[in-house]
Image (tube, rainbow, N blue to C red):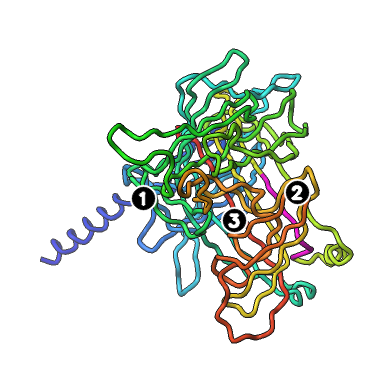
Amino acid sequence: MKRVFTTFILAAIGSFAIAQAPFTIVRPADGSRVREVVHVLIPKAAVPPGGYIGIYAQGKFIEATILPTDRTGKFYVYGLDTQARHLADGPLNLEAVLFENYQDTPRIINRSSVQLTLENSAAGFLPPGGVVLRYSWPMGIQYTYTVYHETKIEQGTSTDNSNGGRAASQSADVESFRQLFEVDNHYENGDGLVRAQLLPLPGHHRILVSVDNDPTPTYHDESSALSVFLRLTDTGLQRWGAVPYASPMPGTSGGGSTPEDLFGVQPLPSLPYKRVRPGSSWATRFQDGSFDLSKIYEVNSIVQHFPERGDFIDVEWQMGHPCAHIINSIQAGIQSDESKLLEKQNADFTGNKLEVKQEFWFALDKHVVLKSVETITQEENVSFENNFGGAGASGGPGVPSGGPMGGRKGDIGPSNSGGNLGGASSVIKPLGDLQLKGGGRGMKGGAPGFAAQGGPGTGGIAGFGRQGSGSGAPATSGFQRVTDEYTYILEQ
């Protein structure tokens, strides 16, 4: 009996040993050339219960985590985004380290490494004399982008700011939807007739967006999203834009637009008019969706333009394609003696200002934007009664004539003006409607080149929201920074 029992124990130990796989990086193979996101595969059977994996690049710690498995369930997989981590091209040492907790202290069990060559640069696709970037607008093609929008709000008091304090931060207004651009015609001069429309996410029948008079994202039925048309040049600039008239079917009442309709368009980024190469800069125009809802079927433009600067950053791989990496940007602000002093002190807030940055990757082979990240950051002086709500502050002076207007990038939203529609309609809110505002989001700014006065807000927190229900304490001087980030990713 004793011998049988011993044999059974030995057999069990042998089975356990067979089940263990060596801890090694299976993929990528040693010596591989890699780019963009590197997927690191490690046998699942090599990681004991309670074990976790740390990733190192060039000897520097990246992250330690419990990894998900791949589709087969046999391997743990870690996606190392070499571009987001700003890893330099060239030799790349990638190491995976197996940890376990021993007496509440991480202990290394095993490690494995591979030597790779990182090649994110696509400079080889750039002609020696530079490149002319143009949209091709092939008739019948559809470009559908998934759009992610997130707002970050930061606030602080003037006293803390002058003493080196940093603003408190919170995130709000997370939403996602899709934007369709369909090319209905291609003209001999290179222009394209493009139909733009909002779409729900795949598998959904409603669109989650925030609207002008309610910044909280709400759902809208997909049937309420109507089309607009733009004739665009091969650099993406609008020649004209229009909203098609919707006639009622015979025997039915009504016609035109209704308060529930959504017209959504944020044009694609403008391309440089000249031949460019990394290091080039040029004057270009930012286009923001805007038209007069009271004359919705009379307008011949549905965008407004603001001057901006374009910079060619590099040629690099993005989403599997060689791309021109470009940043278009606008900066405007109010300089005063106080703001200059705050700048010298490296203060968090130095005065009312606005920055719009449009960073995008234009595919050299597909002639279309694959990814765009648009960031609108607005800083302003505010006053508030307490930490839970307060009256909006007066807005600062408007941007000088010819420059950009202050404010957030347009959300999709109904206007309160009825006009000849007999009701409100919906449209991308123009950037100029929110000049260096004071109180809440719902405010209107002044005309270009004129001072803007803000009013009480309609949002949610101090100086940025509905009037607070405080006890009437004296107003506190402070500042607010609102950052809206819109990420457009082309569905492939």
Left of 180 or right of it: where is 469?
right
Q: Answer whether residue 176 is magenta in the image.
A: no
Quick one: SS at disc 2? strand
Three-letter code, disc 3: Phe
Closer-to-camera residue (469/109): 469
Q: In which quarter of the image is residue 33?
A: top right
Closer-to-camera residue (296/193): 296
The residue indicated by pointer 1 is 44
The residue indicated by pointer 3 is 61
Three-letter code, disc 2: Gln
In the rendered image, residue 219, in percent from the top left (x then y), is placed at: 39, 53
In the rendered image, residue 46, in percent from the top left (x then y), is placed at: 38, 52
Which residues, given as a range, are shown in magenta? 349-357
Q: Quadrant of residue 169?
A: bottom right
- Residue 22 at least partly seen: no
Q: In this view, does 222 lie above or below 480?
A: above
Question: From this viewpoint, which residue is outermost toward the top?
Answer: 188
For disc 1, the neighbor class at 10 Å (few under 14, some 14 to 19, many from 20) is many
Closer-to-camera residue (62/251): 251
Q: How far apart are marks 2 and 1 (CA)?
A: 50 Å
In the rendered image, residue 202, in percent from the top left (x then y), is placed at: 36, 42
Three-letter code, disc 1: Lys
Left of 345 or right of it: where is 410?
left
Question: From this viewpoint, which residue is outermost toward the left?
Answer: 1
* Residue pictured at 69% horizontal, 22% vertical: 132
The residue indicated by pointer 2 is 331
* Residue pictured at 75% horizontal, 74% vertical: 158
- Of the residues under marks 1 and 3, which one precedes in the sequence? 1
Left of 485 or right of it: where is 71?
left
